[in-house]
Image (cartoon, rainbow, N blue to C red):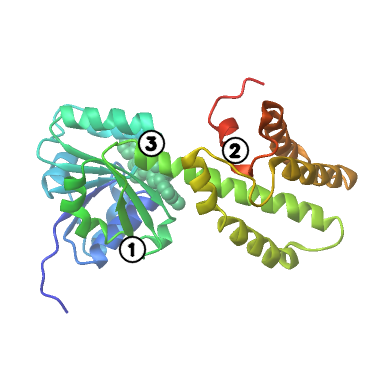
């Protein structure tokens, strides 16, 4: 056992996620101070060795690093924005979910109050916190991240994405786009196969294999997007659009919802109409990169 003394940390907000964060700090040996609007949520953590600060101000003063995790950004401001809550000299790591504009605004607000500020996003569920599978994204000054990385590593795999405070939230929502796209595609296929008596569990291994195979294409598509050249080395957008038609027809023929494949097809058709039918699929980035006024 190491006799190294871990840095003290404070966790503000003890909902499902905040409690998991505090527990991970405790288990990694950090002296952990906690505070929550509803104090009773600290009881179990106190039994596990956390110290419940009597006031929010004392919680903030107890450690050089305070991790905040509450419902949303308005709650962060309601909590920390009142007079008498001392933020000067504190490093705040705000792991509350929100969008990039809220994150950048919170950074300016925290800096005006004399705090160092890292914005963050948690790409994990509470049971994964404290394991390497929990992805903790941060954005803000690299030196502040480096100063507190040893503590943040107790929560999971902590990464700093860059100085722009909005980046963690942007990655967070981009990851959500990936998550719902894969889940919706899986549900579309499952609904189709169920019409032929194939249950979800039978289809799942094939669906998983397809999702993994398609994920392998991403680095190649990224190269095309970054270079702005989309030679059809594998399949042209027109070839994809014809297959989309099969998916729409099949869905309609068996009475399954065809909204999702029709959305894919509408985007491909616009790109083809703009002259990109002979290019690789990644050329659709042009459609994704602008608002749709349909
Ligand atoms: P939760 O269980 O509903 O807890 C919400 C927390 O916010 C509680 O500590 C609550 O205090 C506090 N709070 C809300 N409004 C407040 C206010 N005006 N003033 C002071 N405290 C306030 O939510 P959670 O699951 O812990 O989620 C917290 C954050 O983590 C959210 O931004 C969420 O998106 C993010 N997150 C959660 C998960 C997950 O799987 N749970 C995963 C990734 C990210 P009280 O106890 O006093 O009500």
Sooner in the amino-acid sequence: mark 1 or mark 2 = 1
Picture quarter with the N terminus: bottom left
Q: Quadrant of the C terminus?
A: top right
- The numbered disc on residue 214 is none
Comparing labels 3 and 1, the label whose residue is closer to the camera: 1
* Farthest residue, direction top: 293
Question: Around disc 1, counting alpha carbons within 10 Å, would you say few (fewer than 14), some (14 to 19), or many (20 or more)?
Answer: many
Q: Quadrant of ligand 1?
A: top left
Q: Which mark is residue 283?
A: 2
Residue for badge 3: 72
* Cβ at disc 3 under 8 Å from ligand 1: yes
Q: Nearer the viewer, residue 62 or 64?
A: 64
Q: Secondary structure at mark 2?
A: helix
In this picture, is 8 found above or below 37?
A: below
- x and y, in percent, of residue 186 in the image: 68, 54
Cα separation, mark 1 vs mark 2, equals 40 Å
Position of 290 with respect to 262 (left or right) is left
Residue corresponding to mark 1: 130
**Location of residue 282 by image quarter:** top right
Q: Earlier in the sequence, mark 3 or mark 1?
A: 3
User: Residue 257 placed where, x, y %?
Assistant: 79, 42
Image height of 278 relative to 211, above or below: above
Q: Is mark 1 within 8 Å of ligand 1?
A: no
Q: Quadrant of residue 37?
A: top left
């Amino acid at each position: 056992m190491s006799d190294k003394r871990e840095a003290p940390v404070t966790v503000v907000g003890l909902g499902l996620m905040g409690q998991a964060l505090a527990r991970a700090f405790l288990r990694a040996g950090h002296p952990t101070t906690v505070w929550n609007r509803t104090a009773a949520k600290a009881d179990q953590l106190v039994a596990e060795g956390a110290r419940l600060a009597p006031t929010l101000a004392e919680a903030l003063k107890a450690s050089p690093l305070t991790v905040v995790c509450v419902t949303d950004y308005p709650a962060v401001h309601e909590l920390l924005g009142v007079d008498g809550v001392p933020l000067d000299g504190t490093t705040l790591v705000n792991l509350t979910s929100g969008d990039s504009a809220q994150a950048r605004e919170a950074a300016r607000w925290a800096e005006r109050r004399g705090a160092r500020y890292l914005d963050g996003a948690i790409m994990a569920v509470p049971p994964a916190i404290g394991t390497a599978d929990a992805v903790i994204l941060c954005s803000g000054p690299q030196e502040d991240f480096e100063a507190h990385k040893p503590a943040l590593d107790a929560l999971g795999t902590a990464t700093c994405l860059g100085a722009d405070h909005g980046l963690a939230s942007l990655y967070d929502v981009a990851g959500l786009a990936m998550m719902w796209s894969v889940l919706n595609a899986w549900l579309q296929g499952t609904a189709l196969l169920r019409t032929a008596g194939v249950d979800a569990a039978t289809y799942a291994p094939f669906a998983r294999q397809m999702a993994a195979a398609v994920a392998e294409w991403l680095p190649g598509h990224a190269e095309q997007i970054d270079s702005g050249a989309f030679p059809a080395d594998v399949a042209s957008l027109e070839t994809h659009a014809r297959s989309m038609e099969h998916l729409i027809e099949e869905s309609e023929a068996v009475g399954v919802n065809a909204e999702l494949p029709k959305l894919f097809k509408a985007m491909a058709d616009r790109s083809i109409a703009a002259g990109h039918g002979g290019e690789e699929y990644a050329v659709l980035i042009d459609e994704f990169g602008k608002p749709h006024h349909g």
